[in-house]
Image (cartoon, rainbow, N blue to C red):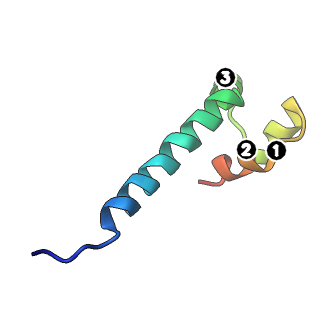
Amino acid sequence: MSQLTPDLIMQVGLGFWGSKTLLSAVELELFTELGKEPGDLEALTGRVGPFPRQAKAVLHR
């Protein structure tokens, strides 16, 4: 009998993080804004207003 490990649970959880990050970026319309003019967090904040904590996490990846 093989030993049970949390590997599968970790793979599912980590896979979800990437999907959630992408969904958050789409919901915040970050790709639309970056398509108009590239910029960093400071530049985007100046164009569209303050970002919630989630947006900062997306942009720092």
Asked which secondary structure carries label 2, the reply is helix
Which residue: 82% across, 46% down? 42
Residue 56 lies left or right of residue 12; in this view the side is right
Label 3 sits on residue: 32
Whole-angstrom CA distance, mark 1 to mark 3, is 17 Å
Judging depth in this view, the residue of 8 and 42 nearest the camera is 8
Asked whether disc 1 touches disc 2, contact meaning CB atoms under 8 Å apart, the reply is: yes
Whole-angstrom CA distance, mark 1 to mark 2, is 6 Å
Which residue: 59% across, 54% down? 61
Residue 42 lies left or right of residue 19; in this view the side is right
Label 2 sits on residue: 55
Whole-angstrom CA distance, mark 3 to mark 2, is 14 Å
Q: Amino acid at mark 1?
A: Pro
Q: Which mark is on residue 33?
A: none
In the rendering, at what x and y percent does residue 9 appear? 38, 60
The quadrant of the image that shows the N terminus is bottom left
Which residue: 40% across, 62% down? 10
Asked which secondary structure carries label 1, the reply is loop
Label 1 sits on residue: 52
Decide: few, some or many residues near mark 1? Use Cα within 10 Å; few <14, some 14-19, many ≥20.
Answer: few
Residue 10 lies left or right of residue 37; in this view the side is left
